[in-house]
Image (cartoon, rainbow, N blue to C red):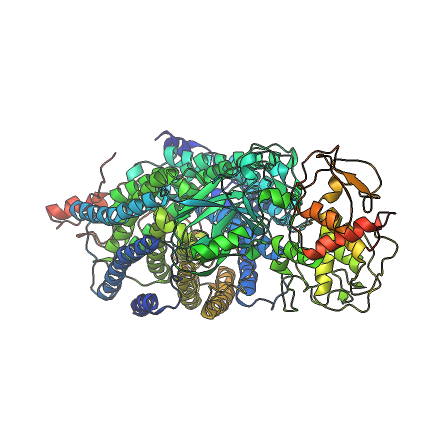
Amino acid sequence: MAIAVVLALLVIGSVLFNFLTPWTFTPIASNWGSIDAMIIITLAVTGIVTLAIAVFLIYVLVKYRTRPGLKAHYQPENKKLEWWLIGLSSLGIIGMLAPGLVVYNDYVTVPEEAHEFEAVGTQWRWMFRYPGDDGEFGTSEPRFINGQNPLGLNPNDPKGQDDRIILANELYVPEGRPVKALLRSVDVLHNFFIPQIRAKMDLVPGIVSWFWFTPTVKGRYEILCAELCGVGHYNMRGHMVIAEQEEFETWLASKPTFAESLTMGTMGGLIEQGKALAEGQGCVACHSVDGSPSLAPTWLDIFGRETTLADGSEIVVDEAYFRESITDPRAKLVAGFPPVMIAYDFSEEQLDALVAYARSLGADSETTEPEAATDATEDSSGASDGAISLAERGEQVASQNACSGCHSVDGTEVIGPTWKDLYGSERTFTDGTTTMADEAYLRESILNPAAKIVEGFQPVMPAVSLTEEQVDALVAYAKANSSLSLEGE
Amino acid sequence: MAYADDAEHEELHEPKSFWTKYVWSQDHKVIAIQYSLTAIVAGMVALTLSALMRMQIGLPGVIDMDAATYYQYVTMHGMIMVIYLLTALFLGGFGNYLIPLMCGARDMVFPFVNMLSFWFYLLSVIILFASFFVPGGPSGAGWTLYPPQAITEGTPGSGWGIILMLISLAVFIVAATMGGLNYVTTVLQARTHGMTMMRLPLSVWGIFVATILALLAFPALFVSAVMMMLDKTLHTSFFMPAMVSLGQQLDYSGGSPILFQHLFWFFGHPEVYIVALPAFGIVSDIISVHARKNIFGYKMMVWAIVAIGGLSFVVWAHHMYVSGMNPYFGFFFATTTLIIAIPTAIKVYNWVLTLWQGNLHLTVPMLFAIAFILTFVVGGMTGLFLGNVIVDVPLSDTYFVVAHFHMVMGVAPILVVFGAIYHWYPKITGRMLNDTIGHIHFWITFIGTYLIYFPMHYLGVLGMPRRYYAYEGYDFLPESAHDLNVFITVVALILGTAQFLFIFNMLYSYFRGKVASPNPWKACSLEWLTPDTPPAHGNWGDKLPVVHRWAYDYSVPGAPDDFVAQTVSTDEVASESATDDELIELEGHQPSET
C-alpha cells in the first residue's frame, strides 16, 4: 500500500508546509491588500478541492486494491453524478472569478486624485520623471535620446521643460497618496515590480503602459525588473522610497528640471559633478566606491591599480584606460566581470568630472600626470592629486555651464561679450552708464546678469547657480584671458 | 468503411532491405520509434541543461557560468522540452504508434508523407542543436523569444542563434503539419469495420483533438517566426518600435512587440493542450486497463476533450495580463480561462471515479497514472491562481509561474509518458520492462518532482522573479529562500541522474527482458489483438479486425473473463445461462452516436 501511504504523506506534508512555510507574502506596503485576500480565497477553494480529491483517491486505493475474488463494478456512466459535479465545480469557479474581477476592476480604475510619475526602463537601469509645476509631462521619443537627454524628452515641448528628471535608480513617492505609474521603455521590454506593492506592469517600447497604487508604509523598497530584457535583467535593480510628503517634496526639489539638465547646470565643483553623474547615470549601481565587492570593478583606488583583462593581459589603470572604459567598455574588459556595461557617450567635460570624482576616492601615486582632454593652459601644474590652477578650473566651469556658448575667449563677439580683454576694460551699458570691468563687476554679471546689460547685446543671459568657488574660478579665467589689469587687483 | 474493405484487398508491399525497414521506413511503427528516440535524446540534452541551470541558481560559482550562457541554457531547455520533446513525443511518437493500431488500420493514410514528417523533424532538431556552435551561440531570449530583445544586442545569441532557432521552428512546423494531416485523416477515414468514433479509445481522441489544435495553432507560430526573421534580416518593423539599443539608435519604427505576444500565445496556449490532451487520453486508458474497469463517463470524457480543445483557442491572453495590452481584455480572458477549468475538472473526477469500485492492480504503469492524478491536480489548481487576472498580477514572472507550468506540463505529462512506455513496451518490443527498476524509477521520479515543484510555488508568492541568473543582494529575499534553492538543486540533480535508470531499463530489457505474451495486461483495445507481437508490417494479417463494442468492457457481469476485447461479439461471450440483464451488458456498451 506504499502508494497510498506516500500520497498521504505528501498531502499532509503539503498542508503543513502551507501553514508553516517562511516563504510567503512580503509585508504589504500598498493598498492592494485585496489582491492578497484574493490569493487566500483562491488557496482556500483550490486547497479544499485538492484535499477532497486526494483523500478520496487515497481511500479508493486502499479499499479497492486487488485481492483474490475482488471484481470491479461495471458502471459506464452516472449522468446525475456528473451533472452534480459540473454544477459544484461551476460554483467554485464563479466563487473565485467573481470577486477576482471585482478587485481587478479596482485595479484598472485609477482614482481621480492620483498624481503621476513616469518610470523609464532602459537596459539595465531605471530612470524616473515627475511632472513639473504645470502638472503635465512633456512628450518624448527615442530619437531625442543622447548623453545629455537619456530620457529622450522632446526639447521643443514646453510642457516638458519643467519636468523633474531623476537619473539615479531611486524614486521617492509620498505616503498615502494614490499614484499612477506611467511606464515607458526606450529599448526592450521591461517590467516594474516591487513585491511589497503587489502591482506590476510591463514597460513596452512604443507605448505608455500604467498601473496605480497607494503607498501605505514608509520605507525603502527594491524595484525588480520582471520581464527578461537581456543579460543584465537580473541586475536591473532600483529603489523606491515611500516618504512623508515633506521629505518627498524636498527630494523632488533637489532634482533638476529637464531644462536645467540640458545645460548641465548642476551644482558643485568638478568632483561633485562627477559624483552626481556617477550616481545619476547609474555608474554606482555596479561600481562600488568604497572598495566593497560589486558587479563591476570598484572605483576606490582604481587609478594605479594593476588589473588583469579578460584576454589575460595585464594593465595599470590610468586616465586613458578609465575614459576608454566608459566610452567603449568592450574594448578592454576586466577579467572576472560580466560584459554587461553599455557605452556612454559623455562629453569630454563629463568624462573629466568622472575622472576627478574617481580620483578623489583614493590615492594613485603611481600614475603619471593625467592627459588633459580639455585645453589646459600652459601653467598646468599636472600634480598627481588632480590640483589645477584656478584659471584652468574656471575654463572647466565655463564649458560645463555653457558659458562658452555665448562668450568666446578669442575676441569674436557671439551672443555675449567676448572675455578676451574683458577684465580691466571700460564697459558701456544700455542705460548709458559706464564702469570698469573689475572683479566685482564680473561677479555681478555672472550672478545677476540683468543688472547691467552691455550696450549692443540682448538681455538673454540666464541666471546660473554657481558656488563661490566656481565664480572665483571664472573670474580667474577671465583675468587670465585679459592683457589688461587694474590697480589693486 | 471503404478504407477497411480496400485494405483487405490491396497488396502489402513489405520493405525488404535494412534501409527501407529501419531507416527510410514508411511503417508508422518504425516512424513512431524514430520520433520517440530522437525526442528522448533531445530531452536528455535539455535535462542536462536544466541541471546546469539549477547549479547556477542553487550553488552559484561551483560551475563557471556567466549570465549570457545561463540565459542560453534557459532558452534551449524550454524550447527543446516543449516542442522537440513533448510535442514530438506525444504526436509523432505515441500518435504514430497508437492511431493505426487502435483504429484497426494497416498504417497511416499517407505513409510517404509520414516518413518525410520524421526526417523534417530530425532536420529541425539538427538545426536547433547547430545553434550551439555558431558565433554568438544559441539564442538566450527565453523560449518565448519576445521581441525586441530576441534580435537586439544585449541578448545572447541575437545573431546566428535566433536565426537558426526560427528556421528550426519553421522546419518543425512543416514536419508537424505533415504528421498532423496523417493523424487526423487516418482517424476520420481509416477506422476498421465496426469502429465508430465513439468506440475509439480515449488515447485516440486525445491525440486526434490535439492534432487538430496543432494544425490550427502552429501557423500562428510560423508567421510570427517569419515576421521576426524579416525584422532581423531585412530590418522590417513588424514587432520593432522606434528604439535605442545599448546607446545606439536603431532604424526600426512603428512595430508592436505586443503583436508578437498575441501571435505567439495564440499558438502557445493551444500548444500546452497539444501536450496535455494526448496525456489525458492515454492516462484514461492506462487507468481503466489496470483497474479492470471501464473509464467512467466515456461520452463526457470525449466531450471534455473536445471542449477543452475548442476553449483553448480563446484563453491565450492570460499569458499577457501584465504585457501592457488593453487592460479590459483581462476581464474576458480571465473568464474564458476559468471556464476551461470545468471540463478539465470533470476529467479529474472521472479518473478517480474509474478507480472507485475498481479492482486496482498497482503495476508500474498504474503507479505512474496515480502520480499523474495528484500532480496534475496540484499543477492545474495553481493555474486557477494565474488565470484569475488580479491574482496573476503579483505572481506573473515569478517562480509561481515556473512551478505551475513545470508541474502541469513537465511533471504530469512526463509521468504519463513513463507510464505509457511501461504499458506499451511489451507490445512494441515483445518483452516486459524490468519491474524492479521500474518501481525504483517511479518512486524517485514521483517524490523527487513533487519535492522540487511544490515548495517552488511559495518562492513565487514571496516575489522571487523568474529568469534571474543570480539572486544575491536582494534584501526582500530571506536567507532561507536561498536555502530552498539549494535543496531544489540537490533534489533535481538526484532526479536527473535517476532518469538514466529508465534509459538503462529500456535498453537492457530490449535484449534481456522477460518475453511478453501478446496481451499481458489483458486489455480490450485493438492494439493488443494483433496476430504478431511486435506487430508485423500491415498489422493485422489478411483480415482487418471487426469491432463489436467499445474499448472499455472490463469486468462485465456474466462474461467469462474480466475483460471482453473489442473484437468479441456477444455470441462468443455470452454463456447459456446468461440473464437478460447480463446479455444486455454483454452486447457491449454503446455510447450513443453524436
Image quadrant assignment for residue B213: top left
Q: At which x and y percent is residue B108?
A: 45, 37
User: Which residue is nearer to you in this view: A10 or A332?
Assistant: A332
Q: Nearer the viewer, residue A295 or A139?
A: A139
Work out which quarter of the rendered image holds the C terminus of chain B and state it: top left
Which residue ends up furthest to the top in the rendered image? B2
Residue at (75% x, 54% y) in the render: A473
Q: Quadrant of the N terminus of chain B?
A: top left
Percent across and percent down for residue B492 are: 49, 65
Position in image of residue B182 (x %, y %): 45, 36
Position above or below: B460 against B160: below
- Rendered location of residue A22, percent (x, y): 39, 68
B397 and A461: which is toward the camera: A461
Q: Is residue A326 visible?
A: yes
Would you say A237 lies left or right of B561 here? right
Name the residue at 67% across, 65% down.
A298
Instruction: Report the number of discs.
Output: 0
Residue A169 placement, left or right of B565: right
- Visible residue check, residue B563: no
A301 or B334: nearer the eye? A301
Query: Furthest-left residue in view?
Result: B580
